[in-house]
Amino acid sequence: MDFGKYIAHRGLHDIKKGIPENSIKAFEEAIKKGVAIELDVRLSKDGRVVVFHDKTLKRMCGVDTPVSDFTNEQLSAFRLKDTDEKIPLLSQVLKLVNGRVPVVVELKESVGVFDLEKRTYYLLKGYKGKYAVMSFNPISLWFFRVFAPDITRGQLISRFKNKKVRKYIERIICASPLVWKLISKPEFIACDLRCVSLETAFQAVDIGADFLTWTANSKELIESAKQFSKSVIFEGLEDDFDLTDNFNEN
């Protein structure tokens, strides 16, 4: 799938302008610029697919409690970073985008067995625009490989040292090409720019997968990443950054 050269990480957000990440306003800004949207999904207590990155509400809403402890109605009472923006549902975002730009859905961790995958698939299969799913978890991608092989899948990888030892070990395992070949069989690899290498890029080519990178947060970094990435997931760029070549040929 062609996402274009640029993918807006959690939408085109800028908290200085009152536009928080993974918000309706951030997605509206990405649509205005004509760039693909990356967003994160997880489940509320009542099984709704909400668009939110972190496991807890602490960083974005000031409450150190897991998202999964609240129903969607309860979550709707919170505001993102003291703005008027609320935590949106995936269904709301898809209705807003309405096929105008591609959407890349990152599936976060879930307690139930394939609960998040099943509910996300239910919402996506009726959507008419371009979209893909991606995850660090190869088992999550295996679900789509088996039950929804028509949906484009992406394996997120990072070998960057994480303070949480368990998460770091899990990500090292998931960054193995053997895992891609046997379990997830992705159409694209999305690699952490902090640990990108030519070897990883060639490993993606070896399985016939496109090579994407994340997250570029400066003009210099995005220009460098474009040299070896089909698409670059970016954030934090100033208004004067030229996005008009988004769907031009490399």
Image (spheres, rainbow, N blue to C red):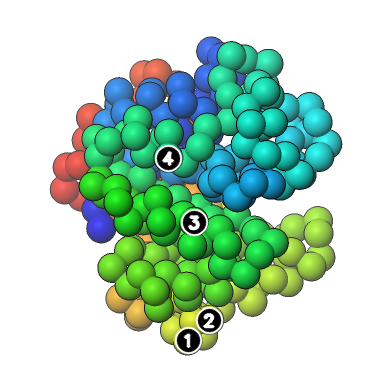
Query: Tag 2's secondary structure?
Result: helix
Q: Residues within 10 Å of mark 3 (few under 14, many from 20)?
A: some
| Residue for badge 3 | 119
Going by the numbered disc 4, the residue's amino acid type is: Ser
Going by the numbered disc 2, the residue's amino acid type is: Val
Eye-nearest disc, 3 or 2: 3
Question: Disc 1 to disc 2, how far (Cα)?
Answer: 5 Å
Query: Looking at the image, is mark 3 or mark 4 earlier in the sequence?
Result: 4
Q: Which quadrant of the rendered structure holds the N terminus?
A: bottom left
Eye-nearest disc, 3 or 1: 3
Q: Are marks 1 and 4 in contact (CB under 8 Å)?
A: no
Q: Residues within 10 Å of mark 2 (few under 14, many from 20)?
A: some
Horizontal side of 226 relative to 173 (left or right) equals left
Horizontal side of 91 relative to 249 (left or right) equals right
Q: Are marks 4 and 2 in contact (CB under 8 Å)?
A: no
Q: Position of residue 207 (x, y in %)?
A: 35, 80
Q: Which mark is residue 182?
A: 1
| Residue for badge 2 | 179
Horizontal side of 108 relative to 58 (left or right) equals left
Q: Are marks 1 and 2 in contact (CB under 8 Å)?
A: yes
- The quarter of the displayed image where residue 113 is located: bottom right
Q: Position of residue 41 (x, y in %)?
A: 54, 47
Going by the numbered disc 3, the residue's amino acid type is: Arg
Eye-nearest disc, 4 or 2: 4
| Residue for badge 4 | 91
Q: Residues within 10 Å of mark 4 (few under 14, many from 20)?
A: some
- Can the viewer see residue 196 in this picture? no
Going by the numbered disc 1, the residue's amino acid type is: Leu
